[in-house]
Amino acid sequence: MTGASKTRYLGQNNSEKQGILLAEYLLYPLLYLQEIWYNHGSLLYPGKASNSDQISSMKTEPFNGHWDRSIAFIGEVYRMSSESEKSSEDNKSEYDSSQIRALEGVEGIRTRPAMYIGDTTGRGLHHLVFEVVDNSIDEAVNKHASIVKIKINADGSVTISDDGRGIPVGEMEEMENRSALEVVLTEIHAGGKFDRDSGYKTGTGGLHGVGITAVNALSEWLEAEIRREGHVWTMDFARGIMNNPLQKLGKSDKTGTKITFKPDHEIFPDTKFTYDTLRKRFQELAFLTPGIHINVKDERTEQSDEFCYEEGLIEFVKYLNRTENPLFD
């Protein structure tokens, strides 16, 4: 270190000393390069400079009066960095019970949607439909339903309906007399598949009581229409929160569940469903559920398909070999 550099360190705090050191490392090479440029510029670029006095004045002019300001600036940067680190350490030390959050119900789902549907890309978007359809398939597997209909509506929403028993709508005393329909659609781990006493004797696609709640939480709006107990019951929601309580409409001698929802654009960057993605999934479900009728329709393009395979996996093998010449029938 030069004598001048040692003098500059006198009376400086650590940040300023670090600034001076950095300036020396950064600016001295620049000064050296500049001297090479002005001393040999005429050799590198003929005609660039020829007057020795001009070169001498240009060699120092750009840096005259700038050294102190450079040192002060870099020292200030170090000071701010040190304060930022100290502030960060202080914030860490302030971690206490007031910073603990307990998210319940739909709030937790909307905060971390990927935990429930995988992600918020197209895969997660279509998973919403799969979750609702799986409930209908559970009814079919246990001989409570025979038809499942999926329709992509013109407004981008989706309607899934079945002719199963219909989600219960009665009051639940242990849940402050709320309708069972509201509980199923707004509370995680609420459902009828935790044991085999509710008619689901055969293995089902959902056992944790989370799927349909996640769909409701991640939808801009959701409408549920239930047919059971001789009536039509309705309830609607907005981003997982109930808009209107359970309403009993006209009479009906049919049973079943119809769910219509529109994915929330605040959660999903792209809320447009792909027909082929849904079609492929539901054809596979039809192969796995012999005898069930699955109808898929897209109002946007008028595309539609109907799947029903009485022989199940046997027909799946035939489907795979449709372009081949099998050795055995």
Image: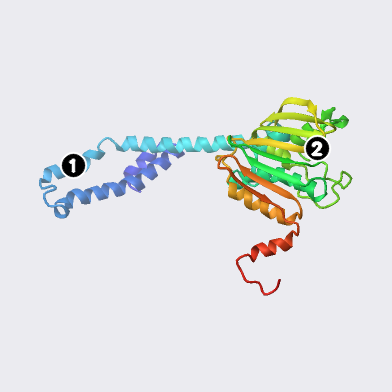
Question: What residue is shown at x 34% (from left), y 43% (from top)?
Answer: 5
Q: Position of residue 247 (x, y in %)?
A: 77, 25
Q: Quadrant of residue 148?
A: top right
Left or right, 88 with reference to 14? right
SS class of the residue under badge 2? Answer: loop
SS class of the residue under badge 1? Answer: helix
Q: CA separation, marks 1 and 2?
A: 92 Å
Instruction: Check whether the beta carbons of the residues at disc 1 and disc 2 lie within 8 A of each other.
Output: no
Q: Is residue 117 above or below residue 173?
A: below
Q: Position of residue 154 (x, y in %)?
A: 58, 36
Q: Report the residue marked by disc 1.
A: 58
Q: Quadrant of residue 152?
A: top right
Left or right, 121 with reference to 196? left
Q: Report the residue marked by disc 2.
A: 255
Q: Nearer the viewer, mark 1 or mark 2?
A: 2
Q: Quadrant of the C terminus?
A: bottom right
Q: Residues within 10 Å of mark 1 (few under 14, many from 20)?
A: some
Type of amino acid under label 2: Thr
Task: Tell me if I can see residue 100 in this picture.
Answer: no
Q: Residues within 10 Å of mark 2 (few under 14, many from 20)?
A: many
Residue toward you, 103 or 203: 203
Residue toward you, 13 or 307: 307
Labels 1 and 2: the sequence-earlier one: 1
